[in-house]
Image (cartoon, helix red, strand yellow):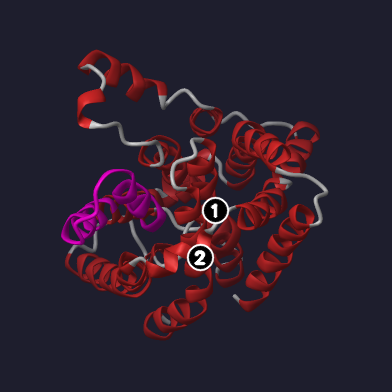
């Protein structure tokens, strides 16, 4: 965990230093954001899914997808209630929910899963990513868009069209294409898949360099004055994963016919307690919708994860 975070912050500081030294500015960051969201991240998701799973593995381990779906359903429900209880409204409420629903599975979660489960980790990651990326690029995108004023809300027809439009984005198309190819038993030749994975692999360092640039250009420290930050981090990164672990363990004991194993439960417990996904900061920056708030959540939650993941791991393992 410490090793992952050290690498995380080195890449952040490279991006921060480049902007502070005026090697590039906001225009270059906007281009990096577009490249990440439209090319690199979709290729990363698609190539990892195609390389990590085949039809037989999906059928044998689909419980990992089930647990991921249950986790997200509970996260959405719990943090809508938390936002309501804290009297958060408008874009502040939506970005708060997005920051706590979507954890950093890509940059922190995947290396931890692969280290803890070297044999099953690849299939867990591939199946989890199908559900994770589908929700991130639909519901997550919607949460990060500016909330219109009541008088300016679109008509029902426009809202339906906008909803369907959220499913037409490169990452969601990549996830669905990978799922269809896997279920049809189609294998992409390594001569094609290898360069796609190499290009997709650029997403991690570039995302962190981009985020470091955002740190230099946004007043992210204002989030430290927000009371919901502290309530949200304790609820999301300690209370929720421990509660989820207890719930799933009890469900597996009461219903042994469920297609889930104890390893799957421990894996999804760690995923539930991960810090804020860096893509949330990209989504908010793209629409200039409280990017400093989202960037602050990414930084503070990542630091807090040193403590929270230690506590969760001590209970679970």
Rendered-image quadrant of the C terminus:
bottom left
Find disc 1 in the rendering and name its residue: 278
Q: Give above or below for 252 relative to 307.
A: above
Q: Give above or below for 59 relative to 10.
A: above
- Secondary structure under tag 1 reads helix
Find disc 2 in the rendering and name its residue: 221
Quick one: label 2 or label 1, which is nearer the N terminus?
2
Q: Quadrant of residue 81?
A: bottom left
Mark 2 and 1 residues: CB-CB less than 8 Å, in contact?
A: no
Q: Give above or below for 138 relative to 2.
A: above
Q: Residue 277 at what x, y percent from top left?
A: 50, 55
Between 274 and 58, the residue placed more toward the observer is 274
Q: Which residues are magenta?
A: 76-100
Main secondary structure of the magenta stretch: helix
Q: Residue 133 at what x, y percent from top left?
A: 47, 42
Between 225 and 286, the residue placed more toward the observer is 225
Label 2 and label 1: CA atoms lie apart by: 16 Å
Residue lying at 31% horizontally and 65% vertically, measured from the top left: 228
Q: Is residue 251 left or right of residue 54?
A: left
Q: Residue 144 at what x, y percent from top left?
A: 41, 41
């Amino acid at each position: 965990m410490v090793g992952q975070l050290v690498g995380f912050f080195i890449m952040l500081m490279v991006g921060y230093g480049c902007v502070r030294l005026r090697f590039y500015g906001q225009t270059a960051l906007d281009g990096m954001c577009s490249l990440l969201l439209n090319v690199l991240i979709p290729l990363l998701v698609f190539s990892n899914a195609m390389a990590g799973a085949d039809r037989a593995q999906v059928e044998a381990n689909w419980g990992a997808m089930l647990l991921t779906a249950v986790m997200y359903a509970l996260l959405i429900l719990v943090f809508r209630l938390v936002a309501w209880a804290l009297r958060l409204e408008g874009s502040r409420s939506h970005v708060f929910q997005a920051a706590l629903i979507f954890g950093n599975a890509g940059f922190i979660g995947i290396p931890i899963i692969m280290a803890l489960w070297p044999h099953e980790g690849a299939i867990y990651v591939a199946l989890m990513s199908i559900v994770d990326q589908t929700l991130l690029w639909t519901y997550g995108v919607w949460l990060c868009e500016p909330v219109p004023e009541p008088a300016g809300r679109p008509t029902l027809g426009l809202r339906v069209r906008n909803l369907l439009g959220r499913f037409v984005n490169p990452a969601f198309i990549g996830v669905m294409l990978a799922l269809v190819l896997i279920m049809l038993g189609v294998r992409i030749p390594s001569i094609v898949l290898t360069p796609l994975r190499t290009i997709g692999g650029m997403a991690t360092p570039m995302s962190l360099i981009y985020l470091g640039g955002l740190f230099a250009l946004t007043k992210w420290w204002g989030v430290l004055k927000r009371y919901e930050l502290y309530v949200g981090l304790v609820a999301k990164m300690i209370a929720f994963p421990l509660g989820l672990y207890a719930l799933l363990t009890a469900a597996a004991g009461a219903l042994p016919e469920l297609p889930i194993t104890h390893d799957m439960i421990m894996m999804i417990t760690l995923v539930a307690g991960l810090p804020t996904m860096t893509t949330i900061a990209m989504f908010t920056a793209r629409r200039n919708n409280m990017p400093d708030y989202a960037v602050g959540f990414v930084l503070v939650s990542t630091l807090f994860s040193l403590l929270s993941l230690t506590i969760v791991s001590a209970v679970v393992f």
